[in-house]
Image (cartoon, rainbow, N blue to C red):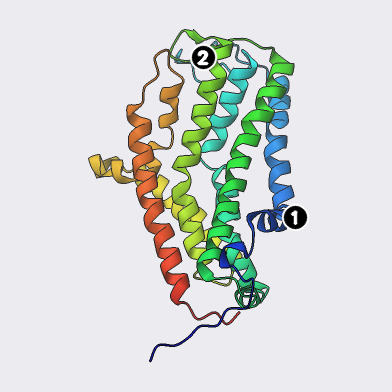
């Protein structure tokens, strides 16, 4: 005889824990405001650093090679690209790990997770809402930095073409879509960190453990990518493609590296997200 599941009149699982409610809860948390303040302040810190140290004005280093750092003060677009260059390797990893790793584990550490599920909020719905909001805040963090950098850089250095380290330049109108493409690729490349953090968040009651674990494993990936003895095996590491967005800052847009990097990142992320949903669906929630 099959069991009969009674549902309260008017109850709809799809209406529990709306995205706007979860987003508002995360927005009001102190770590969200602190992280936003740090990212918004970085461009101004760099402007002060260039003012104190003196801009390179595209002169290049001792070996004559020109990098994005050397062209940072050429225009607002160059300054925004430089801010992305210095932050994409580590700084932008932190908000992704924080927003995705803290979301479920923090509920468990506050002993409120079981009460959410007893509301009742279906487990899949709870994870889906938290994941969508976490990814949304991660994307907002990545957009905030170059947006503030572009505005501050334009005020400090003027509006002009994007001077390319490889030679030549992009018109000011064309540089903005290219920078948007860079931000999009950086976000996709960080989906691996998001997947790691979210999976760990469903496995532990310690938010710092989930966040730190994701950041630590990302650093390990960077270290392994530096081991040239691995040869072509490094192409299976997401870290190997983290700066493939530099192909977007070329006179002729190159898609090869970004497509490969996005494919590797999305593949790992889908596996990690699936593990998070599968494990949480079977987990005994006692906190």
Question: Residue at left 59%, top 47%?
Answer: 136
Q: Residues within 10 Å of mark 2 (few under 14, many from 20)?
A: some
Name the image quarter holding the N terminus: bottom left
Question: Residue at left 53%, top 30%?
Answer: 85
Whether label 1 touches label 2, CB < 8 Å: no
Residue 60 tag number: 2
- Residue 144 location, x and y as percent? 65, 35
* Left or right: residue 165 compared with residue 139: left
Residue 49's place in the image compared with 190, above or below, is: above
Q: Secondary structure at mark 2?
A: loop
Question: Residue at left 69%, top 17%?
Answer: 154
Q: Secondary structure at mark 1?
A: helix
Residue 30 tag number: 1
Name the image quarter holding the C terminus: bottom right
- Residue 81 location, x and y as percent? 56, 24
Q: Is residue 72 visible?
A: no
- Residue 190 location, x and y as percent? 48, 44
Q: Residues within 10 Å of mark 1 (few under 14, many from 20)?
A: few
| Quarter where residue 11 is shown | bottom right
Q: Is residue 279 visible?
A: yes
* Left or right: residue 193 compared with residue 224: right
């Amino acid at each position: 005889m099959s069991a009969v599941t009674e549902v309260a009149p008017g109850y709809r699982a799809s209406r529990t824990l709306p995205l706007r409610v979860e987003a508002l809860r995360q927005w009001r948390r102190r770590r969200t405001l602190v992280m936003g303040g740090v990212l918004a302040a970085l461009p101004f810190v760099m402007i002060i650093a260039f003012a104190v140290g003196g801009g390179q004005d595209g002169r290049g280093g001792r070996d004559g090679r020109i990098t994005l750092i050397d062209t940072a003060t050429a225009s607002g677009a160059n300054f925004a690209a430089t801010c992305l260059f210095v932050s994409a390797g580590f700084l932008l990893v932190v908000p992704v790990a924080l927003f995705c790793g803290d979301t479920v584990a923090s509920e468990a550490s506050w002993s409120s997770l079981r009460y959410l599920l007893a509301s009742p909020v279906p487990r899949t719905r709870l994870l889906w809402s938290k994941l969508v909001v976490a990814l949304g805040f991660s994307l907002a963090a990545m957009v905030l930095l170059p947006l503030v950098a572009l505005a501050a850089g334009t005020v400090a250095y003027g509006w002009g073409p994007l001077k390319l380290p490889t030679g030549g330049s992009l018109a000011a109108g064309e540089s903005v879509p290219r920078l948007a493409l860079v931000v999009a690729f950086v976000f996709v490349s960080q989906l691996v960190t998001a997947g790691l953090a979210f999976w760990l968040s469903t496995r532990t009651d310690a938010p710092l453990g989930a966040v730190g674990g994701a950041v630590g494993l990302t650093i390990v990936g960077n270290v392994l990518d530096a081991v040239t003895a691995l040869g072509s095996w490094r192409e299976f590491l997401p870290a190997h493609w983290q700066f493939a967005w530099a192909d977007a800052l070329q006179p002729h847009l190159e898609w090869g590296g970004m497509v490969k990097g996005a494919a590797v990142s999305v593949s790992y992320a889908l596996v990690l997200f699936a593990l998070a949903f599968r494990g949480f669906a079977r987990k005994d929630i006692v906190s």
